Image: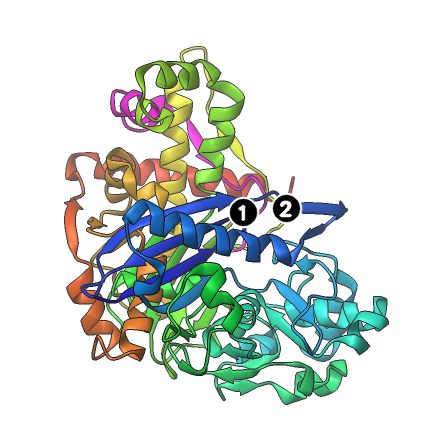
Amino acid sequence: MGYILVFDIGTTAVKACLFNRQLKLLGHSSEEYQLLTPGEGRVELNPETYWKAVKAQTASVCQKTGIQPHEIEAITATTQGETIIPVDRTGKALRNAIVWLDERATEQAEHISEHFSPELFYSRTGIGECNGYCPVAKLLWIKEQEPEIYNGTYKFLLLEDYILSRFTGDFVTEKALLCTSGYFDIIQDEYWKEMLDFTGIDIAKLPRPLECGTLLSSKIKNELFSELHLSSDVRFITSAMDQMTAAAGAGNIKPGIITETTGTGMCIAAAGENPDFSNPQRLTIYRHIYAKNYLLIPVCMTAGLVLKWFKDEFCCDLVEQASEKGISVYALIDHIISRTPASSNALIMVPYLTGVLQPDNNPKARGVFFGIGLNTGRSEFLRAILEGIGFMLRENIELIEKVQGSKAKEIRSLGGGAKSRIWRQIKADINGIPIAGMSENECTALGAAILAAVAIGWEADAATAALAANNVVERSEPNTALAEQYEAGYKKYRGVYEKLKTLF
């Protein structure tokens, strides 16, 4: 019996997941790493750190599940987007990876924006504007500030491409991963030649783009067979950026489904086929796992991170209590919140701790607790955080509904936040929309496994596979008795930001 090995490579950790032929997750293993911050606005990592973690977690997940490495039939990797690694002809990295969080290329982004207006840039890339985080600006930064690296680079790889090259020696990429690069045209589905010509970036230094879920003709490198105890028949398959595989794993491939992933940040996704590139809101549009399919993606930079911050700073006693009881501190927090009345004793929390992208692009915005009184306790602060993130979800759902011209009927909840029943209920009550929990919460890895399963012939297509592998197991229906109360709270939430935004 064959298995699919998926690497889900995030910002601070690598997770290895094993799936069987029925696309059931048998187990996973993960390893965290510490990002490097060599200067203000700079975030890097030694690429070897990713690779060592990938190899270590291959052995670890096999040991945990009892699966022998030689039984693995296919390998794939879904990763964060925008992280850049320049390599030479042998695939050796020439410098640290420039992680997607890095914003060093602000000056280069401004130069690009002088030639390509935000409206034009958006119409070709689906990204609202070119900024210092954008890979095209970072390539230009390397070209200008590190010419010896630029000239010595054979290929500029994104993170998934790099892992693929370490396994196979190939230098290829896939189109969903490229869509946030700033040098890929998501309408023409090819590299944006006009942008590359303007920046002087040699297209020959970019890997060949393939479709998501492409079975590579190249086999795994010989030395890895013995090192990782893999079969000589194992194959590598291109995947998609983690946001797209998460949507695919939840069945969010065609219009009609909205997913929200609450992790460090919050990402809301709605599939569409005819996106509106003229909308002045310039809602982020990604190229989905298939051509001519897209994802509308409002991104909120801080969501679960707000709760973690509050827990770390003000709940040390709860951490100790949870440890003594042998439970998660978040389970203990959920219990406290469940006993706290809705609307948090009139406390409103605006969760923009590191700025806001949508519905208002304001990087200088910051978080706010509004309405603190002598009767405000820690439990109200905790519930207000969950409610504030529920309000943030609502303002972005309303943005999607406005763009798509239709009302959302169900939201599928993913990520760590989906494990909290009280949080799902709060989101349902605030939005007036059912929030569904899925049978498989590891949707990012599942979506990658689905693409691999289709590529090797286990499944006919991604949509059918997702329907069979993942389904709604719990639905939180809105409590209509709280509708009026949360409507007033939402208006106050929006009003607090509008009154304060010029002060930021």
Question: Left or right of 60: which side holds 367?
Answer: right
Name the quarter where the N terminus is drawn: bottom left
Kind of residue at disc 2:
Leu
Does residue 228 lie above or below 126 as drawn?
Answer: above
Classify mark 1: residues with Cα within 10 Å, few (<14), some (14-19) or many (20+): few
Residue range of the region highlighted in magenta in the rendering: 333-357
Rendered residue at 39%/81% (across/down): 214
Q: Is residue 24 visible?
A: yes
Looking at the image, is 383 positioned above or below residue 80?
Answer: above
**Residue 12, which numbered label?**
1
Coordinates of residue 298 in the picture (x, y in percent): 44, 59
Packing grade of label 2 (10 A; few <14, some 14-19, many >=20) is some
Q: Which mark is residue 233?
A: none
Image quadrant for the C terminus? top right
Percent across and percent down for residue 365 are 60, 44
Q: Is residue 344 magenta?
A: yes
Say if mark 1 contacts mark 2, CB within 8 Å: yes
Residue 399: quadrant of the picture:
bottom left
> Does the magenta segment cover residue 498?
no
Separation of residues labelled 1 and 2 (CA atoms)? 7 Å
Can you name the residue that lies furthest to the top here? 374
**Is residue 400 placed above or below 214 in the rendered structure?**
above
**Residue type, mark 1 in image:** Thr
x 46%, y 24%: residue: 371
Q: Residue 15 appears at what percent x and percent y?
A: 43, 51
- Quick one: label 1 or label 2, which is nearer the N terminus? 1
Residue 326: x %, y % from top left: 32, 20
* Residue 93 lies in quadrant: bottom right
Mark 2 lies on a secondary structure that is loop
Q: Looking at the image, what colour scheme do you see?
A: rainbow
Q: Which residue is mark 2?
A: 35
Question: In this orientation, does residue 262 appear?
Answer: no
